[in-house]
Amino acid sequence: MRLRPHGLYIKPQGGARVIHNYNSVGLVTEKCVGCTDCIKRCPTEAIRVQDGKAVVIREFCIDCGMCIKVCSNKAKKADTDGLAAIENYRYKIALPAPALYGQYKNVLDVNIILTALKELGFDEVFEVSHGAEVVTKAVGEIVMNSANAAARPFISSACPVISRLIMMKFPDLIGNILPVIPPVEVMARLSRRHVCEREGLKPEDVGVFFISPCAAKNTGTHRPLGYEKSEIDGVIAISDVYVKLRNKIRKITPDKAEILAHSSFRGVRWALSGGESGNIDINSIAVDGIDNVIEVLEELENGQLDDVDFIEALACTGGCIGGALTVSNPFVARNNIERLGLLMRCDAGIKARRVDFGPVDFAELAFTRRLTPTRALKLDADMSKALEKLERMEEFIKELPGIDCGACGSPKCETFARDLVMGQANMEDCIFMLRRKVKMMAESMVELASKLPQTSFIQHRELRD
Amino acid sequence: MKLHYEVDGEEFAAAGQASGNIKKMLKQLGIASDVIRKISIAVYEAEINMVIHADGGTVDVDIQTDKIYIALKDTGPGIPNIDLAMREGYSTASDEVRDLGFGAGMGLPNIQKNSDFLKITSAVGVGTTVEIEVNL
Ligand SMILES: Nc1ncnc2c1ncn2[C@@H]1O[C@H](COP(=O)(O)OP(=O)(O)O)[C@@H](O)[C@H]1O
Ligand code: SF4
Ligand SMILES: [Mg+2]
């Protein structure tokens, strides 16, 4: 493990998108003041302050976006693509996540939002929620199949942060993760195939862009979980197009909106916690917020949830509407989407078109690669050395003040102890230990000062007086 | 490496802290996933038993390179008939405890299933000691 600065990563132009060890979260160095906002809130304790700047330990970062949300100096940014990136392709497709629909209050017709999005320069707009409907069917089939009973409870693979959390902190639960590719990937594959047939295009002419609430899903296009290569060519943050879209939305009246919607509320509700599990009639838990998810996974690991069939676990509060790249408050966004849902479910509701994406073979949705433990927590490859380090760590913990002040740059005394053992920190980085050392030095100096040579004239005179 | 924990019998919400801590240690040692799962279940069940059937107690852990030894000791009411207590579904838990989701009578059988060595020493009115060993 090595601490590395994480300035914004520059993507190779035009090259392969698959990059190992890629993380989305980056630092705007000038804005970082080296406070303890992000180190304290990072759920995997992946951040340290070094030389006055926040540094991410990549092995520990799962791109949850918490640091982006909590940084009061706006110094954390996700390394997504700008809108300009779409110009590299002849035919441009936008794939908006359903979380986008929750961003605008009182815009109750999805077609207005989709039309506004298309006007940003896209040739076609397809709803990711359609992919969610496809995945819902596949998930239902796997979970309901009694042959798969041994793997229950299944954990949804929809949130990449949770999958990566499990790969790092709950390796024994990897086998519970549902091996199905995420909705946006399904949609990327279907969209490209569809427009190539419809417009007579070559696959490489088509640029597929995900309009994302999520930093981790950006990472997922570079480092796919469970499959070789992503079909997504770029990821644009909802927050980056929010204002442009709002300005366009204002000018579009319902009668002028192009009919672009093509999915049902079953897919749209995936943006909300409880949306995915609510579609399947089984005994399920829907948990959101990464701390809550960790608690549920602990219980599962302790064998306390064997009666549950399915766990929908989303890292963000409220689900993807609470993603780091969204703008609206997640509870307000939830209300917006629920109102939309009421409309979509009534007959006069929202006008939709039919798009024929062709047949989907469920086998194509299955993972083609195993998820493997990341081993980031491991102190040493050698068990006896690891044990030795753990013992030393425990000793350090006893010695340290235990007040988790963060001044050393580590989030907790315990993490600092780990850093010490791993050779990533010095004892003097702790101001309390430093003060103790200074005091000890001062005391020995006083002691030394009283030890003057026997022949000293001054000392003898002082004694005599 | 030796660890020691005190388990508070009054703090129901904190039950599971000792086993949680042990899990965390084992993950830092890079113990195989299936072994971690076994230890998690065994220690958690034993810790919970100490809280719901006795008045808390102590947990002592000795981690060696090839095995982990855990001793959970309480000064609760003791178990009159250990063979009976080991049976699947046998439980003396109160309705109150059942309402909290415990008392399915699967704890001791699960500890047995998930450990490589199990020894229960108990005397009525004196207390219970559960010793668990799992090979790493
Ligand atoms: N530490 C303990 N002190 C006293 N009695 C215990 C203890 N652990 C287990 N028992 C007894 O053994 C029974 C079976 O335990 P267990 O299999 O864990 O089931 P449960 O805890 O669900 O009742 C308990 O109902 C209780 O009567
Ligand atoms: S809840 Fe949604 S937005 Fe948040 S990390 Fe998971 S997938 Fe991304
Ligand atoms: Mg029990």
Image (tube, coloured by chain):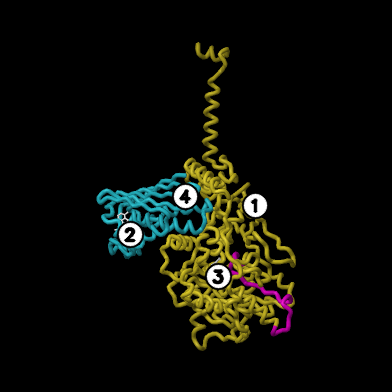
| Labels 4 & 3 near each other (Cβ < 8 A) | no
Looking at the rendered image, the disc whose residue lies closer to the viewer, 2 or 3, is: 2
The answer to whether the residue bearing label 4 lies less than 8 angstroms from the nearest atom of ligand 1 is no
Note the chain letter of the cyan one.
B
Q: Which mark is residue A4?
A: 1
Specify the quadrant of the image occupied by residue A42: bottom right
Q: Which residues are magenta?
A: A197-217
Chain A colour is yellow
For marks 4 and 1, give the CA distance: 36 Å
Q: Name the kind of residue labelled 1 in the image.
A: Arg
Tell me if label 2 and label 1 are in contact, CB under 8 Å.
no
* Res A179 label: 3
- The answer as to whether the residues below labels 3 and 1 share one chain is yes
Cα distance between the residues tagged 4 and 3? 33 Å
Let me know if residue A203 is in the magenta part. Answer: yes
Q: Secondary structure at mark 2?
A: loop
Circles 4 and 1, Cβ within 8 Å, touching? The answer is no
In the image shown, does B20 or A353 lie closer to the viewer?
B20
Amino acid type at circle 4 is Lys
Tell me: residue B87, above or below residue B63: below
Query: Label 1: how many residues lie within 10 Å, few (<14), some (14-19) or many (20+)?
Result: few
